[in-house]
Image (tube, rainbow, N blue to C red):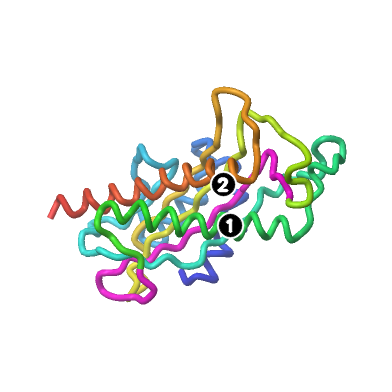
């Protein structure tokens, strides 16, 4: 599956399936099981992500570098900040605000992954090679509770107990052959124990914390493969 096909898969059909699949309903994940099985993947149990498929008898031990393809970001279809607060100026967003959120989240993904996997001695590169693992990732169903659009920053304060939620769709490929090795899907929400002042800064921090958890899971998987050789 090339990058273009992956984007269509992640942000189209899969985004709809996820509404049921991430609640681990057997009927909801049947389409994903069928698709993944047809691609040579088998669903396995995972404590790190909601849904995980792997190619049997394939190891990640030979990979010491990662090539992260451009990250696709899509808001949840039902996300409409303008409808919150009875049309208050606080939630009026322009297209530039939406694109800024998507761009910053995509950049944060690469930044956090590079830092976290570096703890295991892995590096991020820009060219394929035999020891390079290619990552295709998309963040879908993004829902930001208080997006803090640029035109209202500094004028109002919004207090919430959560910043929102997002779902990761990630595939691992051999960077040379393009063979699909694994597919992971995981829905995470940013929640707090008390009311917090929600700003673009706090939203970014919450997002990075979630992304860091995903990156740590991948690093541990790579480490585990190395330890088995």
User: Disc number at residue 155?
Assistant: none
Neighbourhood count class around disc 2 (C-alpha, 10 Å): few under 14, some 14–19, many 20 upward: some
The image position of residue 205, as x and y in percent, is 53, 43
Q: CA distance from mark 1 to mark 2?
A: 8 Å
SS label for mark 2: helix
- Residue in the foreground of this view, choosing between 155 and 14: 155
Count of marks, rendered view: 2
Quadrant of the image for the C terminus? bottom left
Label located before the other in sequence (1 or 2): 1
Name the quadrant containing residue 46. Answer: top left
Position above or below: 173 against 29 = below
The image position of residue 161, as x and y in percent, is 62, 28
Which residue is outermost to the right? 87
Please report the residue visible at 53 percent of the width from the left and 69 percent of the height from the top: 5
Bounds of the magenta segment: 125-149
Neighbourhood count class around disc 1 (C-alpha, 10 Å): few under 14, some 14–19, many 20 upward: few
Position above or below: 188 against 192 = below
Residue linked to disc 1: 104
Circles 1 and 2, Cβ within 8 Å, touching? The answer is: yes
Name the quadrant containing residue 164. Answer: top right
Side (left or right) of 158 relative to 15: right
Please report the residue visible at 78 percent of the width from the left and 51 percent of the height from the top: 151
The image position of residue 64, as x and y in percent, is 25, 63
Please report the residue visible at 41 percent of the width from the left and 47 percent of the height from the top: 214
User: Disc number at residue 204?
Assistant: 2
The image position of residue 11, as x and y in percent, is 60, 58
Name the quadrant containing residue 65. Answer: bottom left
Is residue 134 magenta-colored? yes
Position above or below: 106 against 88 = below
- Residue in the foreground of this view, choosing between 23 and 92: 92
SS label for mark 1: helix
């Amino acid at each position: 599956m090339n990058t273009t096909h992956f984007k269509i898969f992640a942000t189209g059909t899969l985004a709809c399936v996820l509404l049921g699949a991430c609640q681990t309903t057997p009927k909801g994940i049947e389409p994903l099981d069928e698709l993944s099985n047809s691609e040579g993947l088998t669903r396995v149990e995972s404590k790190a992500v909601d849904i995980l498929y792997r190619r049997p008898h394939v190891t990640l031990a030979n990979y010491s570098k990662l090539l992260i393809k451009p990250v696709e970001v899509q808001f949840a279809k039902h996300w409409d900040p303008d409808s919150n607060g009875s049309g208050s100026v606080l939630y009026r967003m322009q297209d530039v605000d939406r694109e800024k959120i998507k761009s910053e989240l995509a950049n944060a993904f690469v930044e956090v992954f590079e830092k976290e996997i570096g703890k295991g001695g892995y590096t991020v590169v820009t060219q394929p090679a035999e020891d390079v693992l290619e990552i295709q990732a998309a963040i879908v169903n993004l829902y930001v509770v208080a997006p803090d659009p640029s035109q209202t920053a500094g004028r109002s304060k919004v207090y919430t107990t959560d910043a929102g939620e997002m779902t990761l769709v990630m595939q691992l490929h051999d960077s040379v052959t393009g063979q699909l090795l694994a597919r992971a899907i995981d829905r995470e929400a940013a929640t707090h124990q008390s009311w917090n002042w929600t700003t673009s800064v706090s939203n970014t921090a919450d997002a990075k914390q979630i992304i860091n958890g995903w990156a740590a899971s991948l690093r541990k998987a790579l480490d585990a493969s190395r330890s088995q050789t």
